[in-house]
Amino acid sequence: MENTFDFGMVGLGVMGANLLYNMADHGFSVIGYDLDAKKADALEKGATPGTHVKGTTNVEEFVKSMKTPRKITMLVPAGKPVDSVIASLTPYLEKGDIIIDGGNSHYTDTLRRVKEVAEKGFHFMGMGVSGGEKGARFGPSIMPGGDQDAYNHLKPLLEAVSAKVNGEPCTAYMGKDAAGHYVKMVHNGIEYAIMQAISEVYDLLKNGQGYTNEELHQLFAKWNEGKLKCFLVEITRDIFATKDPDTGKDLVDLILDKAGAKGTGKWTSQDAMDTGVSIPSIDMSVALRTISAYKNERVQAAKLYTPEVLKIDTPKEEFAKQLEDAFYLVMIICYAQGLSLLVKASEELKMDIPLHDVVKIWRGGCIIRSTLLEDFYQVYVKNPHLTNILLDEHIAKLVKENWNNLRAVISAATKSGIAVAVLQTSLAYLESYTTANMPTNLIQAQRDYFGSHTYQRIDKEGIFHTEWETDEEAKEQI
């Protein structure tokens, strides 16, 4: 059985198995390895009849059964499990073999592994995969980065199994070293922000205007046929129509309001702060997931403060239009923030991330796919070195068309008493970013006053410091 299979997968959970089935359905022979014999057996039983799929619990058999250069993907939890798998594989690998980490590893770990694996004569790639279980089975968005030569070996397979938009595969080379995992990290940060924005829209409609779940279902269905068409709006539409099989009640109303998180949103915020890039909508979405975990404290605080939510008296149809425009603009801003981080990080880490290819492959298969990304793609094709998508004239036109309705929604939310932190933060980012003269001159004066931190002037070159005079000192001199 040596040198039989085209591709190998370590980790036969739902994602790993589905990705192998996808490959097999496209004519590739695949083998999966897992320590759990039940998963290895289930892999073979679940394969499409006539395809070439094998499962094993023997690592030596697994490695030796593949054609060279071997192409092995790991879909295991980030951290030590990845290093353990690499250590178990390397005794059986040959020079030129390719190891791919398809999980959500932190990019700094990927940078380390690229060097360590290269020293042993093998190739290592970090590869983001987005689309969930169905995406893995029928066409995900795939974000490979790292060794260009290794990518060239993988390219035909990845293009075959990825999602397609207008006949184009939703995969492309994302750049050097840890670029694949960095792009996926930012993808997830944007995902956090858009999800939080949708939850705020939901709150305004449900608690601000008294929408039923059926009405919410109908409105989101309508929105998904227009400019808001995207995967997250699509699944939200479906959620509102889903009944609990045990009680017959609307399932969404029975779900506890504590959000889980696996760290990628937090990583995005942390790295943006280290890199010096402002992504406040993403930062706020991470913070709100943290607040959601304070369920017991929130219940106590609600009893203590008894906050009142006032109904939003704007006519339903008018407010729905305002919300549609507001959410559309917030989506633009969330994407813009994430993409601006990719620009700076690509430069600092010398990853050479091609932004036009990033938005191109995000158009289909991934969680943040949307029709809006087609506009972004055309912008980056025209100007691939744009530092922020908000600086494009076409995008600026879209922003201006929806700006006033975002303000109107936030005003209504504030009067109502409903928290819309990501909507507000997005507006604040936009209004700060488009302000030629911020009030930061006062901050610089304060910093110089208490810490002699110096400042620059608008009327002449140089670095300046002032011996500031207090009110008390001034009075003494009178």
Image (spheres, rainbow, N blue to C red):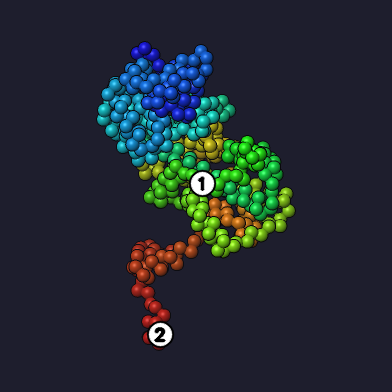
- For the residues labelled 1 and 2, the Cα–Cα distance comes to 56 Å
Element type where label 2 sits in the image: helix
Could you say where residue 132 lies in the image, as x and y percent from the top left? 51, 33
When the figure is inspected, residue 336 is found, relative to residue 473, above or below; the finding is above
Query: Looking at numbered disc 1 in the image, what kind of residue is underneath it?
Result: Ala
- The one nearer the camera, 177 or 135, is 135
Left or right: 236 in relation to 22: right
Q: Which mark is residue 259?
A: 1
Q: Which mark is residue 6?
A: none
Could you say where residue 158 lies in the image, as x and y percent from the top left? 46, 25
Query: Looking at numbered disc 2 in the image, what kind of residue is underneath it?
Result: Lys
Give the label, 1 or 2, closer to the camera: 1
**Observer able to see residue 360:** no
Q: Which mark is residue 475?
A: 2
Earlier sequence position, callout 1 versus callout 2: 1
Which residue sits at x=49%, y=50%? 293
- The one nearer the camera, 260 or 130, is 260
Element type where label 1 sits in the image: loop
